[in-house]
Amino acid sequence: MENLLRLIPADIRGDLIEREETCRVCNEKTGEQIAVVDYWDIKTSRLIKCSNCNHIQLDPMLTDSETSKGCNAFYIEQLLGSGNEEERINFVRNFRRGVVFGYSLKRKKISPHSVLELGPGSGYFCAGLKFVFPDIEITVLDININVINFNKEHHNYKIIHDIPDYLIPECINRFDLVIARDIIEHVSDISKVIKNVNKYLTPNGYFHFITPNGHEDVWKHYLTSKLTDSPSELLINHVNYYDGKGLKKFLVQEGFIPVKYYTYKIKTTLRGSGWKKNQKLMSPVSMRKNADLLIKRQDMEMSDIELKKEKILDKWYIQNKAKWITYLFSIYQHISIFRINPELNIGHEIYGLFKKK
Ligand SMILES: [Zn+2]
């Protein structure tokens, strides 16, 4: 079966070039240019596949202020586009995922006490984790002040307003679990981030992440480049595209041991992502979307989302007195049946639970 699956991902190839910046995973100086992308109207850059470790990243990388501006525009666009009801559904979904994750730790006899989540979004994943471990202490770190304020007011978490690339001395050796769900594809310097995570963890602490399968995620930009020879639009700052084999090797080098490592969701592969050269799968040709314009709309159009936590979690299956009901329902909703070896580079999302050596 695995041999058959190995045939699926198509080769991603480009011209060999000198990079402006060395690879942030392995320091290599050359790479293959596989696409040109526009990050809003903020920056035009290239996607380069490392000649040595296969990691694909932006070259040159976005600066912190460019990232911050684009993220802000993206966050506003998302909020303007989705109604309150949709937000609520997402919150509960993340809560259930937190419950499933919490019980998966419990089954492994892991009981975290102090957790740091990088890029918590709505904070509901950790709320689900807290449902399983009521005494857990949660700290969240984010670059976006709106996210930080929401997490403080809504969940009463401890907050750190910063980016994960900078080392925060107070965090060293303080957490027995660090969570980064859909974060490591966004960071400018993955080496720094992973070194920081390692330092923040207590001995034998755990690191949990999910991140897109890079091969599939970059496919849309690769297609735009191959089929139209034009820059494609990069609105969400995916600046890293991980190779399943390379990511594991990198984490092991940085002092982690894999506990669980797999790819899940294969619908996108079935539709052709990662192998089919079809125009429908392309990322749109860039229109250099104006970020400032969107940021200005924030004050005019955004109303505060009126959301009460008790109301959001008022579901028949969320019961403190019968947590097993919550657990069963959450498992039923979110269990991934197909689990694929990430080294095959197929499927949608990589799940990782690693332990600090
Ligand atoms: Zn490299």
Image: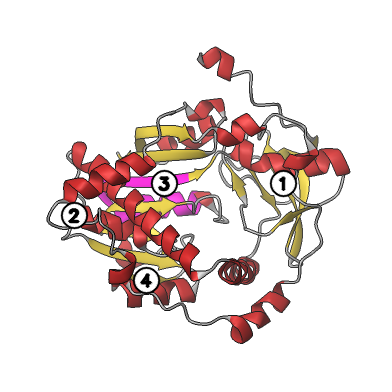
Disc 4 C-beta below 8 A from ligand 1 = no
Mark with earlier residue (2, 3): 2
Mark with earlier residue (2, 4): 2
Q: Is residue 186 left or right of residue 104?
A: right
Q: Looking at the rendering, which quadrant does residue 260 occupy?
A: top left
**Residue 326: x, y in percent?**
24, 50
Q: On the image, numbered disc 1 is attached to which residue?
A: 47
* In-front residue for pair 146/85: 85
Question: In whole angstroms, how far apart are the C-alphas of marks 4 and 1?
Answer: 33 Å
Mark with earlier residue (4, 1): 1
Q: On the image, numbered disc 4 is attached to which residue?
A: 151
Q: On the image, numbered disc 2 is attached to which residue?
A: 133
Residue range of the region highlighted in magenta in the rendering:
191-210
Q: Tags 3 and 4 in contact by the CB under 8 Å rule?
A: no
The quadrant of the image that shows the C terminus is top left
The residue shown at (38%, 71%) is 160
Q: Is residue 183 left or right of residue 66?
A: left
Secondary structure under tag 3 reads strand
Q: Looking at the rendering, which quadrant does residue 55 occupy?
A: top right
Secondary structure under tag 4 reads helix
The residue shown at (61%, 30%) is 270
Q: Tags 3 and 1 in contact by the CB under 8 Å rule?
A: no
Q: On the image, numbered disc 3 is attached to which residue?
A: 209
